[in-house]
Amino acid sequence: MSSAASASSSGAPSPLAPARGWRAAVFSFFFLNGLALAVWMARLPSVRDDLSIGVDSVGMLGLGLAGGSIAGLLLAGPLLARLGARRSLVIGMVGLAVGVTAVGASSSLLHSGPLVFAGLALTGVSNAFADVVMNVEGADAERAYGRTLMPRLHAGFSLGGVFGAVVGAATAGAGLPVVAFFAPMGLLILLGGLIAVHWIPRRPELGDDTATAPPFRDRLRASLSVWRDPRLLLIGFTLLAFAFAEGSANDWIAIATVDGRHLDNTAGAAGYGLFVGVMTVLRFFGGPLLDRFGRVPVLRASILVAVAGIILFVFVPGPLAAAAGILLWACGASFGFPVAITAASEGPQGPQRVAAAALMGYAAFLVGPPVLGFIGEHAGILLAFLPPAGLLVLALLTVQSLREQRAGRGPAGRAAAG
């Protein structure tokens, strides 16, 4: 894949970070971030068994991940402006590695709910912080290429989830303790992040080169000024709806498969793997749909498909119906987040707009675990998936805000899918 000749000076890769290396590095960070969450999600039933807790307590543990993520999102803009993208990514990967390893040790060796909570909080801070920076890098790389890259980059996140789910299911089936899975994955996250950061270009406007970077106050002021854009707020709501649909499956589909559909822990991990697997395939190969039909028609259809999948999973009994529901759910949730990030990046102050939109979208991942856990404990885990479906229906009213703003996108542009 060649670099775009029309890349802006702020987005073009430097000689030290060729275009292919930049793309591969950003993809790697998405993969590692997805892996970190999959490690937790895939073995969640086993952690619950280690701690001997109920669904409501699992939701409370999720508050550690959510609370840490809140802190990470709030810190992302100022810290990105202060530290630059490269150092921010290193900090995020180190925090992820330590947090994941701590959760595994606290579950299997110490059987301590509070320590699992603390490990999840560190994981949440690091994951949210790194995720915002990755999306900024991904949007800039896409702009440099002049091609559709974001769905494929987000496929890296899903691929990390698939890898984590497959290995998690294998370790669960073999009866291995949680720490025997979490600790090696933490090491992989650490080493992968430290290697990939060498291919991220240094860009003064993001604060990577302190000698030539704009003053910190100017960078912080630019990151705050984008919140006055009404279109960006509508994009953020659409992001939130799709993130809630995706995140509710990530958080609870393993538990729902075990408790709601009365299958074993291995089937729970496999159900999660099916969800992230389908999303991975569509994000890799679904770009031509966006280029041919445009963002808004594809996302409207996606919403309807996702809602149909959730309803099928919730209300139709049987393992085959559950699998079909997961498949449709994943198909519908695949494009929303990466497409919305691309839409947010268009126009001036692209990195700042991406950071703001990502913050709004990730709010769904924060409120999801405790809210769905509370509903699941009192009304049943399956019925807890109805609020995400309702939010998707509301997003039909705001999805128009994601329409193409530049030539070369959508049906008219016929840009090649990345």
Image (cartoon, rainbow, N blue to C red):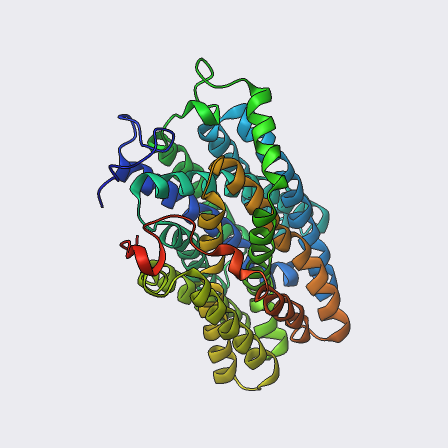
Residue found at x 66% / y 58%:
369
Q: Quadrant of residue 314?
A: bottom right
Judged from this view, the residue extending furthest toward the top is: 211
Residue found at x 60% / y 27%:
221
| Position above or below: 30 against 386 | above
Q: Which x, y percent locates residue 351?
A: 48, 36
Judged from this view, the residue extending furthest toward the bottom is: 317
Residue found at x 27% / y 54%:
416
Residue 387 in view of the camera: yes
| Position above or below: 150 against 244 | above
Along the line of sight, the residue nearer the viewer: 97 or 149: 149
| Position above or below: 92 against 334 | above
Along the line of sight, the residue nearer the viewer: 129 or 51: 129
Q: Which x, y percent locates residue 46?
A: 59, 62
Residue found at x 49% / y 68%:
300
**181 left or right of 51 in image:** left
Q: Which x, y percent locates residue 411?
A: 33, 61
How many badges with numbers are in the image? 0
Residue 273 in view of the camera: no
Q: Which x, y percent locates residue 29?
A: 42, 42
Judged from this view, the residue extending furthest toward the right is: 378
| Position above or below: 148 against 198 | below
**7 left or right of 69 in image:** left
Q: Quadrant of residue 198?
A: top left
